[in-house]
Amino acid sequence: MRKSETKDYTADSIQSLEGIEHIRIRPSMYIGDVGIRGLHHLAYEVIDNSVDESLAGFCDKIWVTIHKDGFITVLDNGRGIPIDIHKKEGKSALEVVMTKIGAGGKFDKNSYKVSGGLHGVGISCVNALSRTLIVTIYRNGKVYQQEYFKGKALYDVKCLGRTNNKGTKIHYLADHSIFSSITYDYDILSKRLKELSFLNKGLHLFLKDERNKKKEYFSSKNGLKEYLSILDKNKDTLTKNIISIEGERESTIVEIAMQYNTSFKEKIYSYVNNIHTYDGGTHISGFRRALTRTLKKYADVYGSLSNKDKKIELTGDDFREGITAIISVRVMEPQFEGQTKTKLSNHEVGGVVEKIVGERLNIYLEEHPSDRKKIIEKVILSAKARQAAKKAREFIQKNNPIHNSFLPGKLADCSFNKPEDCEIYLVEGDSAGGTAKQGRDRKFQAILPLRGKILNVEKAVQYKIFENEEIRNIFTSLGVSIETENNQNNLNIKKLRYNKIIIMTDADIDGSHISTLILTLFFRYMKPLIEKGHIYIATPPLYLIRKGNRFQYYAWSDQERENILHQLGGRKNVNVQRYKGLGEMNAEQLWDTTMNPKKRTLRKVNIENLSKADKIFSILMGDEVPPRRNFIEKNAIHAKIDV
């Protein structure tokens, strides 16, 4: 907001609601947790206060310093928190802001039109959870200071002298008796400042780490457009231009950057008053409605559906496939679901976003017929692919094996009929599959050989996935099907034929890759099987160790191999065979080591953190190479290599 739109920022602007004593008792209510996330949340709150000064038009520089002793300093060149006496409280407005929950200029709309922070709780929350906090104010040509211990002022505000500077400096040390650690992650703070620079073009942010002398400077002239170009830098863009939308209505400011690429995924990043709304909200709903309505109008006029394709009904998913968008809204009185603010609930904001996007997008499409044509062609292609995927799913569902006559020819089924007593091995290759068929217990163990590396479902268009023979064989063998309801794909496992589904691949790099491909299929399209504990990974041995004709041992690791060799008195007259694949074992060896329930070791697959698992699958199996390279370089030290 511009300076001319606000009144004077004085002690009368500060409204006090209640005290902060219980913040120290239940800190997680305010900052999520008392681990690394909560620790950095404190820094975000202080930084966000300075950013709010920027939004109000009074600050264009913010300095953040990580000190060696655990302190954090945040300095801005804003107006400085008022230090004159608050009429209601009878003490400095600065002390009111720092010690009263819900006290701050954020509640006076003449001082801040929009703001982030914890609804004015932010800085008092930081103060309450700090062992030491020193606030220095540069205002009206003078320097003022006050120090706090665990949220309580140690002395009245004092004047330290004169200055030509203006702004607020917060220097604090998080309370180690509350937080599990007070060690800051430079990368976490760097990422947040970089994000803020894109969301607030023209704002200059400086980060300094005294622990290792690292420094960074963040500023953006083009804001969200520049941010989008970075997010989409590894994608093949479909349109020539980044579509930029800006507008203001009913005191809500909307800024959007969007672009289509050749991928099959929708990626929308949303923010409200600089707060990342991970779970979306009404602003996202408004954007999607406008996108669907506007593009549908052009698809009806310019679409190239043939007569036989006319029956295909375009859905919202079709219009969003391959889009990357950043949505930033600034709202006067934001309402969120939950204290951590991950979902916007203001109903009126959705309508504002819908109107602005509808108007601006319509103008863009009229003025850029080439981009319009490419987008509409992408939408229609998506619709056709969705229709093909539906037919492929229906084929799988139709051939759901009620009787054995429908089972794939490659499947060697078991004789037991009760699923709770049965298990199936998904085996890499026909050779190993043949050995497994010979070595298994036919009563309760089924074998399904898989030909080489199955399709990478993370990269493939959906209808190609369900048309793939190996994937169809997995679906039909297991007896599961995908059913569509309200445009949502749901896995039906009521007729699941096996209690245990065991992935069995070679103990080498290729085997690990195949195992990951199968796990990707289960995670993306059969997640309930993982969640209900049906998925396992077999662990074949790495070594066969023989001494003469009498002694035979197996080792599953290099350390175990060395221990066995030590017990046998060294390598003399000892033969060590490194298994390169399952096919090198005979049927008896495979049964003894990997398939016999009394001797084998199975690793059960479960999901501890859904969002983290989703991210890792995207990195490892997706289209984007740089994130995968970074992940491998960062985590290679943790990998176990057997030679």
Image (cartoon, grey):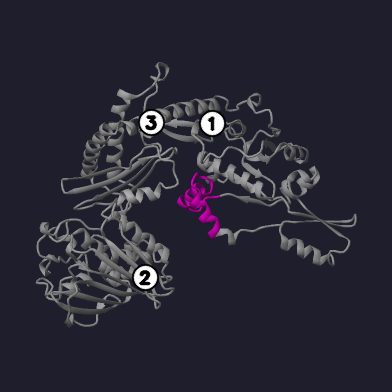
Amino acid type, label 2: Lys
Give the label, 3 or 1, closer to the camera.
3
User: Would you name the residue on which mark 2 appears?
Assistant: 208
Q: Is residue 112 above or below residue 182?
A: above
Q: Give the mark nearest the N terminus, 3 or 2.
A: 2
Residue 54 position, x and y percent, is 22, 61
Region in magenta: 606-634
Q: Is residue 102 left or right of residue 258?
A: left
Neighbours of disc 1 within 10 Å: few (<14), some (14-19), many (20+): many
Foreground pick, 143 / 422: 143
Foreground pick, 197 / 524: 197
Q: Quadrant of the N terminus?
A: bottom left
Residue 26 visible in the current orientation: no
Neighbours of disc 3 within 10 Å: few (<14), some (14-19), many (20+): many
- Mark 3 vs mark 1, CA separation in Å: 20 Å
Residue 183 position, x and y percent, is 42, 71
Q: Is residue 478 above or below residue 35?
A: above
Foreground pick, 45 / 254: 254
In the rendered structure, find residue 242 and report the number of the disc placed on it: none
- The picture quadrant where one finds residue 298 is top left
Secondary structure of the residue carrying numbered label 1: helix
Neighbours of disc 2 within 10 Å: few (<14), some (14-19), many (20+): some
Amino acid type, label 1: Phe
User: Would you name the residue on which mark 3 appears?
Assistant: 379
Residue 354, magenta (yes or no): no
Foreground pick, 322 / 43: 322
- Mark 3 vs mark 2, CA separation in Å: 46 Å
Amino acid type, label 3: Val
Q: Give the mark nearest the N terminus, 2 or 1.
A: 2
User: Would you name the residue on which mark 1 appears?
Assistant: 466
Residue 338 position, x and y percent, is 31, 54
